[in-house]
Amino acid sequence: MNAIITEEVEALLGQADFTGTLDWDGFAVMWGRMVRRIVLGDSARDDERVTEDLRRLRKRGNLSYLMPQNRRLRERFLGRLQEYVDRAEPGSLAAMVAQTPAPEDAQPVQQMPQWLFAFDAEAWATFRALSLAVAHPGAADEARAEMSQAPDLPYLRATVLESLRLWPTTPLVLRDTTAETRWRNGTLPAGTALVIFAPFCHRDDATLPEAHRFSPDLWMRDRDDSDWPLVPFSGGPGMCPGRNVVLLTSSLVLGELLNRRDLTAGKPLDTGHLPGTLSPFSSTFTVRRR
């Protein structure tokens, strides 16, 4: 994965050197190639059809039962994924699927669409983390110094976690209570469905002094149950199982970008009070060789 990330970021920066600008469109193309190589194998690098098929299926799925199923498209998409599993290119997640024992009635390939689309949110978080690192004095230098100490990248991981704290890609966490729970204005029985609104916890300036500031130190110390809840990857038994894969890929992409070039944001952030929302799609950076 490290080698794939290094190669794809280098290709992205070659394009950015030519235009003088790094924007979302270029970053997204690089990200798609990287993800396909990691999940499906090197031969999938330019298989944009498989990504487009998934995008079309997700778009239809957003309308739930209001949109008729496109069985032909779904079968083509899943069939293409199965081809990569059968190919089992060394180092890919598809190879791990092929090599992992499973019951006869299991369909492991149907887990792979989730891996592919979950990387989308990671792309947003990484590009936002780049905005944070570029905006805050000393952050880029800290990241560059850390890259020489790979694979341990605590500061870069903390920067990505701060991106997810400040602008959660999964703002709603769903849970059921396991015991009767008493609140200030009443008691709820066990089995009550709850919606936990992560931005409320992450940006509660009455409890968290760093609520609206970039504070990677929050993640560079041991946290326990007494800490105010920060749940960028959910928590407890339902914590995202892809947490470490996300932090590995995001941290390395972020580190490679900062280590190889000097970047200046097209629209600087207000670092004293970071905005409640930040669109990665409109972020741009001026690129200069170091």
Image: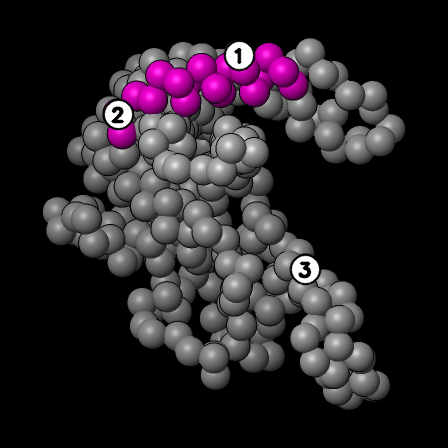
Residue 120 visible to the viewer: no
Which residue is found at the position 39% from the left and 37% from the top? 101
Residue for badge 2: 90
Residue for badge 3: 174
Mark 1 or mark 3: whose residue is earlier in sequence: 1
Q: Secondary structure at mark 1?
A: helix
Residue at the right extreme of this rendering: 66
Closest to the observer, 85 or 170: 85
Circle nearer the viewer, 3 or 2: 2
The crowd level at tag 2 (other Cα within 10 Å; few <14, some 14-19, many 20+) is few
Figure check: 93 above or below 82: below
Closest to the observer, 216 or 71: 71
Using the rendered view, name the quadrant where residue 65 is placed: top right
Which percent across, then down, holds residue 273? 53, 62
Figure check: 218 above or below 112: below
Residue 49 disc label: 1
Residue 220 disc label: none
Give the residues drawn in magenta, as a range.
Answer: 74-91
Mark 1 or mark 2: whose residue is earlier in sequence: 1
Is residue 263 left or right of 243 when viewed as pictured?
Answer: left
Mark 3 or mark 2: whose residue is earlier in sequence: 2
